[in-house]
Amino acid sequence: MRTDAIPPANAAGPGMSPAPPGILPEPGKVTTLRSRRSPLAQPAEQRRILADLRLQTAVGEEASFEAAIAAHGHACLRPTRLEYYQINLGQLCNMTCRHCHVDAGPDRAEQMMSDEVIEDCLRALDLTDAHTVDLTGGAPELHPRFRDLIQQVRERGRHVVDRCNLTILLIPGFHDLPRWLADHEVEIVCSLPHYRQRNTDAQRGRGTFKKSIAALRRLNAAGYGQGDPRRRLSIMTNPSGAFLAGNQRAMEPQWHAALAREHGVTFDSLVALNNIPIARFLEWLQDSDNLQEYMTKLISSFNPQTIDGLMCRKTISISWRGLVYDCDFNQMLHIPCRDAEGRPLAVRDFEAELFGRRPIRTARHCFGCTAGSGSSCGGALAG
Amino acid sequence: MSTYYQSEHLKQFTQIAEGNRELADKFFDYYNSVFREGSLSGREKALIALAVAHAVQCPYCIDAFSQGCLEQGADLDQMTEAVHVACAIRGGASLVHGIQMLEHVKKTGM
């Protein structure tokens, strides 16, 4: 534990809680790696740090993800069936969360998907039978073509998921969005690390919890989170620190009870996700001297039962630049899928058959998805 | 021994089987069964364990169950309340003996 990270008890104002141990005291002051010109803004530097760590397995061998899956009969990971078509619309966000794996923030308006790439995405979507289009970012709602894209996807009969940070719904210009999303039967997967203020504000910035509750009430008022399959509201929780996500099935009743009792808020399901050690979460792990221990924890918690359901096996992830990846984390680390010539695969050159046969690219960050109950965009994979 | 309480000992706990495998297996089997979800949730058991860890002042258990509580979805407020429960019981256990003292004084004094 880093005692120097804990502010004195009187540091916070009246009614404000001091930050918990291990979480730095000024969460409101988080800025993007890119704006600080941090070496970690470079994906290659992040890959190097993870590859160079001295990490051993229980039997004393150098830990590698490829060896871990090979020991369970997978020479490499292969796709199963493409189900989720994930489009990352860009890295612009109204928030700057401490753990963000995208290094998103308000200063990233340049990194947004162009009209041309959006058309390429829709053309490639028609070549697949993915049942769900998953919109993420940044805050995907900030993209000027967000609503238009949803309409075009819905016309194609595909289900749409909006990965929503909640606070965006309180910004002027977005007040009608809950109703609009409800009318278009868009599923909302929203981020809320904890049903109490402390951990939520520590990770996502001071004041976020209150705003998130206000946004959840607006979603409830639009018909979300009340058991209607056309207005599904899932809450996505990830740990506020260097520990694994809890068992989502065991935690869900507790979350329902706490949010209903304390805030009168309802939702449909809880999704628990591990933090992947990249971008700003990697920076926090380094700064708080937790990196070695966290990676050791991920590796020692390797659960082979997660392999069958890994999201990279049923997902395509497309970047704002129009390149194709196995998952959003590979996207942020710039580990693209390759075309037949070994070049980064562009969505405009997408071929469903070739894509369905590709080897999935893995590295040490992948231990984040196989640790404990496992982790995917849909939450736990086992247990 | 140059120092007591080395944090690596927590990870090496299962090596206690070296002197007696059968008893160690029985203990760890029992231990794992105790912490399975039952009538009490995993979070409730982890909070009880955290409180007991403070009462028995075991640094290994405090590390293990601070992590365990967080992983089970408890937060610092809940964990601090659990530690205060341990503290209150320990303090109360001392203080309630004061009645014995009081009786003694009353019986013996004038």
Image (cartoon, coloured by chain):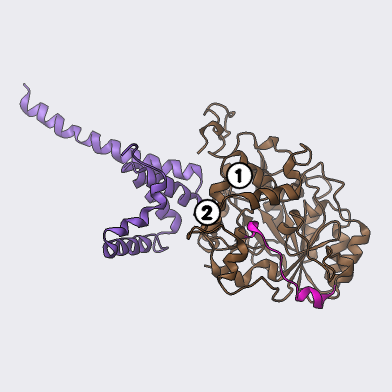
The amino acid marked with disc number 2 is: Lys
Tell me which residue sits at (31%, 59%) in the image.
B17
The crowding category of the residue bearing disc 1, from other C-alpha atoms within 10 Å (few below 14, some 14 to 19, many at least 20), is many
Q: Which chain carries label 2?
A: A
The numbered mark at residue A297 is: 2
The hue in which chain B appears in the rendered picture of the protein: purple
- Residues at discs 1 and 2 in contact (Cβ within 8 Å): no
The hue in which chain A appears in the rendered picture of the protein: brown
- In depth, the one of B100 and B57 nearer the eye is B57
Residue A321, located in which quarter of the rendered image?
A: bottom right
Q: Tell me: residue A181, above or below residue B62.
A: below
- Residue topped by disc 1: A285
Q: Report the quarter where the N terminus of chain B lies.
A: top left
Magenta-drawn segment = A351-366
- Secondary element under disc 1, as helix, strand or loop, is helix
Outermost residue, right side: A116
Tell me which residue sits at (65%, 64%) in the image.
A378
Tell me which residue sits at (67%, 70%) in the image.
A77
- Secondary element under disc 2, as helix, strand or loop, is helix
Q: Horizontally, is B1 left or right of A258 in the view? A: left
Residue A262 shows in the view: yes
The amino acid marked with disc number 1 is: Leu
- In depth, the one of A308 and A52 nearer the eye is A52
Residue A272 shows in the view: no
